[in-house]
Image (cartoon, rainbow, N blue to C red):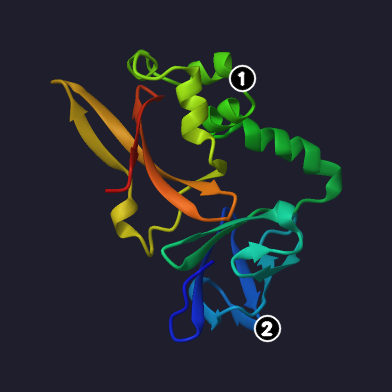
Amino acid sequence: MPEKNKDTTKIYIKTDFPAAFLLNGTFSDRADGFKYPANEPLYITVLPLEAHLLPYTVKMLDGKSLYNNNLIASFCYEGEIFAKLLPRYNYLYENKKSENIRINATTPEKLFWAVKQNDFDLAKKFCTEGLLSTIDESGLESFFNDYTAIMPDEFTTKNSNLNNYTYQIGVNNYSTGEPFYLIDTNSNGVLFHFELVNGFVDNIVGKE
């Protein structure tokens, strides 16, 4: 549960499409750090600015969505709430779009879901030989066991220190660390950097 701060809670909301919001009835063209009374419901209405997308409303309590759960991904981190609102399409096109979302997933996301589905042959395709030399199938399963979802860090307006970083390995090779939240059964996010070499996961490092 988010921590209280003078009886208010902050929520940071992101979308991949242009939108405005109604937050407990208050109109806003952005939602980065919206404060509302702690432990009280928050009603979020997303108003897409693209004609082919449909508006909808989500009710949240203590950082968890109570309605339209398939259209929001949310978690708590350091006492605040972070939420990603997904596009709502006409149902005629929903299945096709869902396939595109899976295809366009990042390598860390593909690795996570392959492990969660116990498809270790597929999971190994997203790892470097170096990583596979240090961890086996049971190790991968154990590492992700306590988490139910993965979410890229898109909230750099608050966490500027969580931007992607690059570090040198050897003389001419570089690896990129991409920040992701692993989310547990209590909707708490834990930050990890997935270090990539040539597009494959080479290491997973927790927040220092």
Vertical position of residue 65 compared to residue 131: above or below: below
Label 2 near label 1: C-beta < 8 Å?
no
Q: Which mark is residue 119?
A: 1
Disc with the residue nearer the chain's start (1 vs 2): 2
Relative height, residue 116 to residue 86 (above, below): above
Q: Amino acid at mark 2?
A: Gly
| Residue at 68% over, 83% down | 25
Q: Nearer the viewer, residue 19 or 194?
A: 194
Left or right of 54 in this view: 207: left
Residue 57 screen position, x and y as percent? 74, 68
Residue 108 visible in the shown view: no
* Amino acid identity at mark 1: Asp
Please say if 28 is above or below 149.
below
Q: Residue at x 53, y 71 (%)?
A: 30
Label 2 neighbour load within 10 Å: few <14, some 14-19, many 20+: few
Residue 65 image-quadrant placement: bottom right
The answer, for residue 30, to whether it is visible in the render is yes
Q: Residues within 10 Å of mark 1 (few under 14, many from 20)?
A: few
